[in-house]
Amino acid sequence: MSAGESRAAMTTIGVLGFGEAGFTFAKALADAGAVHGVGHERRYHDMNQVIDLLKDMQFDPIMTEATIRFFKRSTDLQLPQDFAGKPKLMDDVIQTLLHYTSQGHS
């Protein structure tokens, strides 16, 4: 891992709140779920880069491909139009995804 990649990883860890007072994994998961409502497209592109790297390293990216399909679906559904910013709750994102699914979107 390069120095830049290491700094990026540490920044990500810091953003998640590891080591902060009151941090819980449940809080990080709920925040990540809420951010999905507006951040999925960027993550979709990030995951495409991860797949390329894994393939270059001769790893089977089966889980990564499933993750990409998840982010692509949200991108195709144009979720940001449903939110005026980061949703307050992960449940808001889940309910929106369930609504689209019930309408026949996959």
Image (cartoon, grey):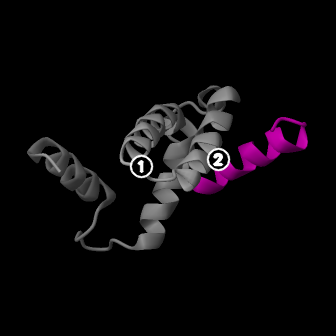
* Residue 5 figure quarter: top left
Indicate the amino acid at tag 1.
Gln
Above or below for 106 versus 10: above
Residue ID at (79%, 48%)? 98
Indicate the amino acid at tag 2.
Val
Q: Residue furthest front?
A: 58
Q: Looking at the picture, how far across and down is residue 47, in whole percent?
A: 46, 40
Q: Which residues are magenta?
A: 89-106
Which is more N-terminal, label 1 or label 2? 1
Q: Which is nearer the eye, 37 or 85? A: 37
In this rendering, the count of numbered labels is 2
* Labels 2 & 1 near each other (Cβ < 8 A): no
Above or below for 65 versus 38: below
Q: Main secondary structure of the magenta part?
A: helix
Residue that numbered label 1 is attached to:
58
Residue that numbered label 2 is attached to:
93
